[in-house]
């Protein structure tokens, strides 16, 4: 399996839903392709396939004991396959957060242009974008509790 090629492919694929979220949030195609969570599901399926394919291999195997210490985690992520699996994790979950932000903002009547910086940062640095959206939502709705 060519990990570099797979990395390039998923990085291009993830742009499709993010561009739809930013530029076409109310388009019928966005509702069909993005709001149905097809892309996070696709990334999750690739993640699962890689996880099980790599777990059995000597050079890229995942040892769960390595998650228990920082040095073990560092050792785990010294493997390209583990880095790609981790990257797929980020792609899927950041996209899920971005989809939720757009749908929540639409329900709460938050203007889309105000959400765009949050989406950019959710794509680039998930927790930063989520925090930005939380603050925006709090200011606009006065609601602390997320639904």
Image (cartoon, rainbow, N blue to C red):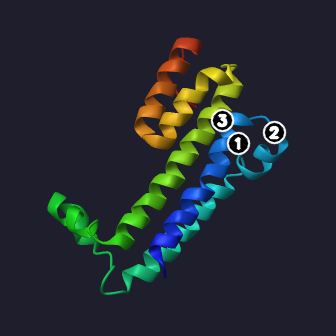
Q: Position of residue 116 (x, y in %)?
A: 59, 29
* Pointer 2 local density, CA inside 10 Å: few below 14, some 14–19, many at least 20: few
**Is 65 left, or right, of 147 in this rendering?**
left
Q: Are marks 1 and 3 in contact (CB under 8 Å)?
A: yes
Report which residue position mark 1 lands on: 20
Q: Which mark is residue 22?
A: 3
User: Residues under labels 2 and 1: Cα distance?
Assistant: 8 Å
Report which residue position mark 2 lands on: 27
Tell me what residue is drawn at x 30 percent, y 83 percent: 59
Tell me what residue is drawn at x 58 percent, y 13 percent: 140
Query: Quadrant location of the C terminus?
Result: top right
Relative to 43, say whether 99 is above or below. Answer: above
For mark 2, give the secondary structure: loop
Q: Position of residue 121 (x, y in %)?
A: 48, 35
For mark 1, give the secondary structure: helix
Tell me what residue is drawn at x 53 percent, y 35 percent: 120
Residue 87, quarter of the rendered image: bottom left
Q: Position of residue 95 (x, y in %)?
A: 56, 47
Q: Nearer the viewer, residue 107 or 88?
A: 88
Q: Are marks 2 and 1 in contact (CB under 8 Å)?
A: yes
Q: Position of residue 135 (x, y in %)?
A: 47, 20
């Amino acid at each position: 399996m060519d990990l570099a090629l797979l990395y390039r492919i998923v990085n291009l694929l993830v742009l499709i839903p993010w561009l739809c979220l930013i530029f076409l949030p109310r388009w019928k195609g966005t509702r069909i392709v993005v709001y149905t969570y097809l892309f996070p599901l696709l990334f999750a399926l690739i993640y699962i396939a890689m996880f099980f394919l790599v777990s059995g291999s000597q050079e890229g195997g995942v040892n769960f004991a390595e998650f228990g210490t920082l040095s073990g985690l560092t050792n785990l992520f010294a493997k390209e396959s583990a880095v790609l699996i981790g990257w797929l994790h980020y792609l899927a979950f950041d996209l899920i957060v971005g989809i939720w932000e757009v749908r929540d903002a639409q329900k709460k009547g938050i203007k889309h242009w105000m959400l765009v910086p949050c989406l950019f940062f959710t794509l680039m640095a998930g927790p930063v974008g989520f925090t930005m959206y939380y603050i925006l939502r709090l200011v606009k709705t006065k609601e602390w509790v997320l639904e």
